[in-house]
Amino acid sequence: MLRISGVGKRFGERVVLNAVTLEVGAGEYVAIVGESGIGKSTLLNLIAGLESPDQGEIHFEGKEINALGDDARTLLRRDKFGFVFQAFHVLPHLTVLQNVALPLLLRGKEKEEIEQKAGRLIEAVGLRGREESMPRELSGGELQRVAIARALVGEPMLVLADEPTGNLDPENARQVLALLREQVKAHGAAGILVTHSEAAAATCDRRYRLTGAGLAPL
């Protein structure tokens, strides 16, 4: 489903990624661990088509992502990808329910389906009763859970999670990790979890360490 072939990226003279190669099939959940600043988040941005590699190719469902135009990449992210950003990117002027429902609204789904799916994900991340709360009323951990629910509500075929448990207590982290794995397995999606946590990585089917030489299996 996802194939990364010899991908490299540099910023100026600094090489961030070098010769990264990875394949993730339908229903596979893969962890990538590594030190801060090694390029884990950059790799996810490349996979999502938010940045372009300097070398190599990234294919999703047989299509080379960076051969697509800007509009096609935007539609791919909207319709197929679920991205859990490290910085949340929760919209401050929308309620919890509106933030979680946003991907479905953008796809033109019916109100009944939106309310049902958004409500289910809000409950799954432990925020039932906070549907009408504004982001300013939430803690960092609650904001992270809103972002995770929003990423999963559209049942994406590619789940990209960037340190999704960084602001969560152990119990909420356990629930979120189980939910991410469940999403990948239930819908035959491809999933990549980027984390510094060995415990989080252990919930995945395969684990890799990212170094300056590429990816090495653990």
Image (cartoon, helix red, strand yellow):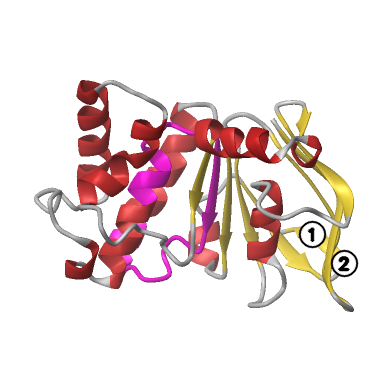
Residue closest to the eye, 99 or 152: 99
Q: Is residue 211 visible?
A: yes
Q: Is residue 214 above or below residue 97?
A: below
Q: Is residue 171 visible?
A: no
Badge 2 amino acid: Ala
Residue 10, located in which quarter of the rendered image? bottom right
**Residue displayed at 47% across by 26% down:** 187
Q: Which mark is residue 213?
A: 2
Q: Is residue 101 within the magenta segment?
A: no
Q: Position of residue 72 (x, y in %)?
A: 66, 33
Q: Is residue 197 left or right of residue 122?
A: right
Q: Is residue 32 left or right of residue 93?
A: right
**Residue displayed at 34% across by 33% down:** 105
Residue 93, located in which quarter of the rendered image? bottom left
Dot 2: few (<14), some (14–19), or many (≥20) neighbours within 10 Å?
few
Residue closest to the eye, 146 or 35: 146
Q: Are marks 2 and 1 in contact (CB under 8 Å)?
A: yes
Residue closest to the eye, 200 or 115: 115
- Select label 2 or label 1 by which is in front: 2
State which region is magenta: 148-174
Q: Position of residue 34 (x, y in %)?
A: 67, 70
**Residue displayed at 59% across by 39% down:** 74
Q: Position of residue 194 (x, y in %)?
A: 58, 59
Q: What secondary structure is found at the residue carrying circle 1? A: strand
Badge 1 amino acid: Ala
Image quarter hosting the C terminus: bottom right
Q: Is residue 159 within the magenta segment?
A: yes
Q: Position of residue 4 (x, y in %)?
A: 79, 44
**Residue displayed at 81% across by 37% down:** 67
Q: Label 1, on which residue?
A: 216
Q: What secondary structure is found at the residue carrying circle 2? A: loop
- Please, which residue is most extreme toward the left here? 129
